[in-house]
Amino acid sequence: MSGTNKPENGAPRRKKKKRLSKKAKRIMIVIFAAVLLLAALFCAVFFGVFRVRNFVVSGELPYSPQEITAECGIPLGKNLFLADTEGAAEKIASSLPYADEVTVTKKLPSTIVIHARMANKTYAVMMNGGAYAITNENLKVLEIGASIPEGAMIVEGYTGSGVNALGQELPFGNGMDSESIIDALSSISQAVTESGMKGIEMINIENPDSIYILYEGRIIIRLGNTSDVLKKLSLAQRSIEEENKLSSSQYGEMNVSTVGKASFLPKDYKNMPELVEYMEGKEAVAKIAENEAAAENGEETDETEDGETANEESEENSGDYDSSYDEDYNEE
């Protein structure tokens, strides 16, 4: 009967599981073994061959290569690719104050190359306690001392709490922004260099809109802000040359805060409180340095004050001039 006959395709066929052939299995095993071997070789080379085995140090610095490499923080045997060169450069610059523009690079297969230049003694910042913080152009503290290095300009207007550590940026307080201070000092220093003006020994940056500099310890030059500072200094230089034709020992104030105009007012030294305060500060630091030197040599120090300033002769000279004198120099 038709009911008892099985349909030709009555039962569903089961899917046959695909089985890898022996040849395919062998290929898979070979590939897996090759991958393991390559991984082992890579690890052996990466962690074995590329290890720090030597350092190369260049640049004229007051530190030995051993001192420099010791401060970089990269030990011998460290994997070259894992060495933190940027962090190493920062450590060297902060730990060794006179190391400037530090670069640390990798040289295959196993060398760390360190290069740095000698920091310039650019500024001497007057500090409380009778000392100067000697800094580079970015206000990194190089040393603390009572003497002013040749070529360094004294900076006034510092209101920080003190130096944290050598190799660190000089801290400024009372809301003073170190970046804006660095920019102002850099602008003035560059203008002094480009103008060829000699005899600038102090910059006061306490008020960024009322910056003034001191020429030869006798003329205060008021710049205002740092805009067009090169033009201002060039005009001041020409104006001072005219004044020096009358007297090269004249005290007074010159205002070049308005571009294209310079006015000079002769003054008696005693009537220049900013200059008096500055000179007294210098004398106090010099006295401390003298006493320290004498103490080191086992000599007795004289703490008495004679009440005289180092500028009595200049006061006598400045008394011959009319303090109401005022002349404008218009820039052509």
Image (cartoon, rainbow, N blue to C red):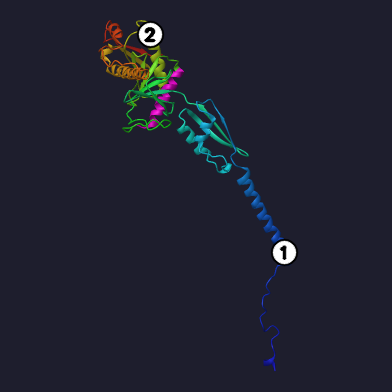
Mark 2: which amino acid?
Answer: Glu
Q: Is residue 279 left or right of residue 27?
A: left
Q: Is residue 184 magenta?
A: yes
- Residue closest to the eye, 188 or 127: 127
Q: Is residue 61 left or right of residue 19?
A: left
Q: Quadrant of residue 281?
A: top left
Report x, y in % for residue 101.
50, 30
Report x, y in % for residue 55.
58, 34
Q: Are marks 1 and 2 in contact (CB under 8 Å)?
A: no
- The span shown in magenta is 176-194
Report x, y in % for residue 240.
37, 11
Residue receiving disc 1: 24
Residue 318, compared with residue 291, is above or below; it is: above
Mark 1: which amino acid?
Answer: Ala
Report x, y in % for residue 11.
67, 83
**Which comes before the other along the chain, label 1 or label 2?**
1
Residue 280, compared with residue 36, is above or below; it is: above
Alpha-carbon neighbours of circle 2 within 10 Å: few (<14), some, or many (≥20)? few
Residue receiving disc 2: 242
Q: Is residue 220 left or right of residue 62?
A: left
- Residue closest to the eye, 120 or 71: 71
Element on which disc 1 rests: helix
